[in-house]
Amino acid sequence: MARIFTIMCPKCKKEFEVHFGDLRHRDVKLHCPYCDNWFLQAESEKIDDRW
């Protein structure tokens, strides 16, 4: 099973899941599937990467 983390979009405040191994702790923009916003992880108010 792939490890994932949950992140909150800073624009619409909705949470969605992202693949941990490919994207966590990398300086890439994430795409919110709800409002089409692109943002860096540092801009998110909430990141849950617990196992």
Image (tube, helix red, strand yellow):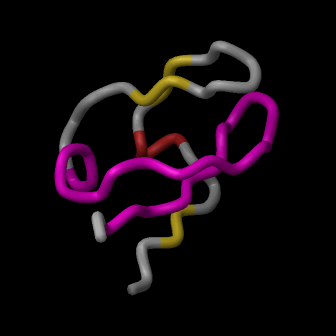
- Whether residue 5 is in magenta: the answer is yes
Residue 45 x %, y %: 63, 55
* Relative side of 24 to 34, left or right: left
Q: Nearer the viewer, residue 18 or 8?
A: 18
Residue found at the very far bottom of the displayed protein:
51
Q: Which residues are magenta?
A: 3-25
- For image coordinates 27% across by 54% down, the residue present is 24
Query: Is 48 situated left or right of 19 in this image?
Result: right
Examine the rendered structure and indicate whether residue 46 appears above or below residue 15. below
44 vs 24, left or right, is right
Split into 4 quadrants, where in the image is the N terminus? bottom left
| Residue 11: percent from left, percent from top | 74, 29
On the rendered image, what quadrant is the C terminus found in? bottom left
Q: Residue at x 56, y 53 (%)?
A: 7
Q: Residue at x 22, y 54 (%)?
A: 25
Residue lying at the far top of the rendered structure: 36
Q: Position of residue 8 (x, y in %)?
A: 65, 49
The residue that appears at 19% across and 46% down in the rendered structure is 22
User: Is 18 covered by the magenta stretch?
Assistant: yes
In this view, 31 is above or below 36 = below
Q: How many marks?
A: 0
Q: Position of residue 40 (x, y in %)?
A: 41, 33
What is the quadrant of residue 21 in the picture? bottom left
Q: Is residue 37 left or right of residue 34?
A: left
